[in-house]
């Protein structure tokens, strides 16, 4: 897969994760991973997260579209489970950045002299002085 394709898929993954309701669904599915339960139906997800069935269904579809969840059919019921392998993609992406920063020595610290930007009279006049001019 190309670098751009990988970046787009990671961006889609993060977009799917950037929603509190979807995170609640993932947390609920994760809680069931270690137990003998075999996933949740839409009704169970809705009941456990406080969402409507319509909203739970929509969020589960978004999560499935980026492979964070998967569905299996059990007779007439669709059961949703967490796809733990999809989180490896997020982990690989994060590790690549972490390793890049760990392998490089830290940049030397620089100090910024804020005294030249803000004078003592700025609080009384409501203005801030800078080297360029007065900021109102």
Image (spheres, rainbow, N blue to C red):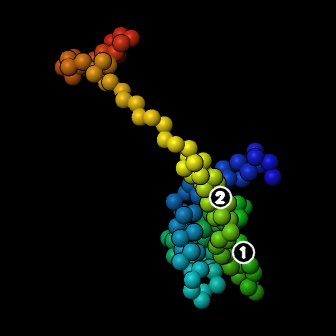
Relative to residue 65, is residue 1 drawn left or right? right
Residue 16 in sight: no
Residue 28 in sight: yes
Q: Which sits earlier in the primary sequence, circle 2 or circle 1?
A: 1
* Labels in figure, total: 2
Q: Which residue is mark 2?
A: 92
Q: Residue, x 36% and y 29% (percent of image)? A: 111
Q: Which residue is mark 1?
A: 71
Answer above or below: position of 115 versus 23.
above
Structural crowding at the residue carrying mark 2, measured as other residues with C-alpha within 10 Å and reported as few (<14), some (14–19) or many (≥20): few
Q: Residue furthest bottom?
A: 36
Q: Residue furthest top?
A: 133
Q: Position of residue 11 (x, y in %)?
A: 66, 50
Report helix, strand or loop for mark 1: strand
Q: Nearer the viewer, residue 87 or 123?
A: 87
Q: Position of residue 1 (x, y in %)?
A: 81, 52
Q: Nearer the viewer, mark 2 or mark 1?
A: 2
């Amino acid at each position: 897969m190309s670098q751009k394709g990988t970046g787009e898929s990671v961006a889609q993954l993060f977009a799917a994760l950037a929603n509190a309701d979807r995170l609640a669904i993932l947390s609920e599915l994760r809680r069931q991973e270690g137990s003998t339960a075999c996933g949740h139906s839409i009704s169970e997800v809705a009941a456990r997260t406080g969402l409507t069935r319509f909203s739970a269904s929509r969020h589960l579809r978004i999560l499935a579209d980026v492979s964070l969840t998967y569905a299996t059919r059990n007779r007439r019921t669709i059961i949703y489970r967490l796809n733990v392998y999809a989180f490896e993609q997020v982990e690989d992406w994060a590790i690549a950045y972490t390793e890049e920063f760990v392998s490089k020595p830290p940049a030397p610290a620089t100090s910024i002299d804020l005294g030249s930007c803000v004078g003592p009279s700025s609080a009384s006049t409501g203005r801030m002085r800078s080297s360029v001019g007065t900021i109102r």
